[in-house]
């Protein structure tokens, strides 16, 4: 075989279709792995690198659309081609809307199929090429935002989009990062700036593939984080507030407050450095950890 | 956030879908206050499709829990997703709320 064009995962509960597709694609210099259901597809994708997925829609267990959505969560840049039964336009539209690269009808038109596959592999190659520079990229983003809590959601969205671009995951990890930023912004706006729209919150973000850093500064008098009562203490459990500062340190790897206490820096590593509680608190020095 | 409520004589199940933050917490409060005003004070919050809560959300939950209790009822939670389970464990809020695996268990806990 000449140079392999790409590795393709074929998912179909019909073994005959798997064989047929394998045969067609092998002739196009593609390496092909076949699996019979969505669960094994996900397992195979986690263990091996692929350039393209072709999946049937109607399969027992996980259907092709659900499988594709799952794949998009794990590897958003992996093109997925969906095979629909003849004449089912609705499913095809649905597949495209949920992120399919393209769709193919059964029975196959070999020429159409190979054209779509080649196009998909090209797109994948291009996005792989783009990714080569990611290790050397740092995304910096700043906001000077008025003290309005209704803006928090969008700010977090922008920040995390930058993080996604650099390979940070969209799962429980992202929930932790978002929550910490959410709490710090709420505090800056409410406690620091007393929700005075004329007062600004300054946000500086630096994201590299290894590390996300967010600095949040308000115009308030600051506070002494060591004086914040522990909300986990039984006597404080029924208090309605007082959990933000704790959650920030729980969900981030490192947290630094400046001397005055009106600026906080949140640090999260892409790969867990010190798993678990990363509590750092202000003490005497600037940007000190304890 | 989407809120859907189904009530029978004894218990109201309130299903939350989306994220609990500053804005949606207020929306939740309005819904629960309405229930309690109409004397539906036994409440289950179904978290099955709730993916996120910040501390403003936690604040509201505790306030509503107190409100339900003060009205002679209770507010219980069920079907927490792993990340919320972690949040409630870490903050010790498991000690404040009665938390159940699923809606049926939570509802049953009111009727025994
Ligand atoms: N940026 C800030 N400026 C001034 N005080 C703050 C700031 N952030 C937090 N605090 C103080 O720390 C306390 C605890 O904050 P937190 O744990 O987020 O709970 P909550 O916001 O519910 O009060 C606040 O009540 C406030 O007194
Ligand atoms: Mg707070």
Image: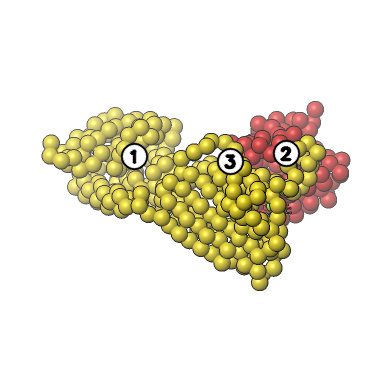
Chain colours: A yellow, B red
Tell me: is circle 2 under 8 Å from ligand 1. no
| Residue A261 figure quarter | bottom right
Above or below — where is A158 with respect to A144?
A: above
Q: Where is mark 2, residue-wise?
A: A232
Residue at mark 2: chain = A
Residue at mark 1: chain = A
Of the two numbered discs 3 and 1 in the rendering, the one whose residue sits closer to the viewer: 3
Q: Where is mark 3, residue-wise?
A: A278
User: Where does the image place residue A71, in percent across and percent down from the top left?
Assistant: 40, 41
Count how many numbered circles sit on residues in the image: 3
In the foreground, A255 or B48: A255
SS assignment at label 3 = loop
Instruction: Quote the CA–CA distance across marks 2 and 3.
Output: 16 Å
Q: Earlier in the sequence, mark 2 or mark 1?
A: 1
Q: Earlier in the sequence, mark 3 or mark 1?
A: 1
In the foreground, B91 or A98: B91
User: Where does the image place residue A36, in percent across and percent down from the top left?
Assistant: 34, 30
Q: Is residue A65 visible?
A: no
Q: Name the quarter where the C terminus of chain A is drawn.
A: top right
Q: Is residue A189 visible?
A: yes
Of the two numbered discs 2 and 3 in the rendering, the one whose residue sits closer to the viewer: 3
Instruction: Quote the CA–CA distance across marks 2 and 1.
Output: 49 Å
Q: Where is mark 1, residue-wise?
A: A55
Q: Residue at position x 74%, y 48% from top?
A: A227
Q: Residue at position x 23%, y 41% from top?
A: A6
Q: Residue at position x 66%, y 61% from top?
A: A189
User: Where does the image place residue A57, in percent across and percent down from the top left?
Assistant: 38, 40
Left or right of A228 on screen, residue B54 = left
Badge 2: how crowded within 10 Å, few (<14), some, or many (20+)? some
Residue at mark 3: chain = A
């Amino acid at each position: 075989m000449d140079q392999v064009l790409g590795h393709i995962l074929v998912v179909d509960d019909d073994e005959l279709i798997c064989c047929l597709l394998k045969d067609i694609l092998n002739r196009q210099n593609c390496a092909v792995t076949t699996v019979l259901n969505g669960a094994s597809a996900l397992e195979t994708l986690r263990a091996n690198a692929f350039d393209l997925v072709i999946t049937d829609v109607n399969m027992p267990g996980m259907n092709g659309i659900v499988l594709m959505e799952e794949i998009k969560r794990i590897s958003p840049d992996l093109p997925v081609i969906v095979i629909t039964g003849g004449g089912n336009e609705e499913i095809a539209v649905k597949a495209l809307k949920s992120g399919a690269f393209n769709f193919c009808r059964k029975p196959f038109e070999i020429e159409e199929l190979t054209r779509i596959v080649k196009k998909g592999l090209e797109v994948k190659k291009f996005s792989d090429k783009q990714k080569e520079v990611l290790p050397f990229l740092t995304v910096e983003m700043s906001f000077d935002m008025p003290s309005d809590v209704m803006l928090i959601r969008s700010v977090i969205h922008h920040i995390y989009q930058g993080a996604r671009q650099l390979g940070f995951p969209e799962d429980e990890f992202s929930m932790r990062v978002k929550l910490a930023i959410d709490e710090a912004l709420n505090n800056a706006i409410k406690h620091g700036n007393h929700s005075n729209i004329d007062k600004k919150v300054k946000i500086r973000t630096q994201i590299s593939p290894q590390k996300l850093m967010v600095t949040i500064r308000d115009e308030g008098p600051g506070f002494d984080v060591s004086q914040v009562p522990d909300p986990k203490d039984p006597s404080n459990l029924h208090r309605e507030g007082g959990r933000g500062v704790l959650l920030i340190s729980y969900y981030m790897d490192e947290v630094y407050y400046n001397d005055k206490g009106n600026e906080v820096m949140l640090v999260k590593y892409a790969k867990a450095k010190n798993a678990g509680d990363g509590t750092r608190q202000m003490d005497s020095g600037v940007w000190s950890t304890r | 956030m989407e809120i859907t409520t189904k009530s029978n004589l004894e218990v109201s199940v309130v299903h939350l879908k989306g994220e609990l933050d500053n804005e949606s917490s207020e929306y939740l409060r309005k819904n629960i206050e309405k229930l309690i005003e109409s004397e539906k004070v036994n409440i289950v919050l179904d978290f099955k499709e709730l993916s996120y809560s910040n501390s403003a959300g936690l604040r509201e939950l505790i306030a509503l829990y107190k409100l339900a209790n003060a009205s002679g009822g209770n507010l219980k939670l069920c079907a927490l997703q792993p990340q919320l389970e972690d949040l409630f464990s870490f903050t010790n809020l498991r000690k404040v709320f009665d938390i159940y695996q699923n809606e049926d268990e939570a509802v049953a806990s009111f009727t025994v």
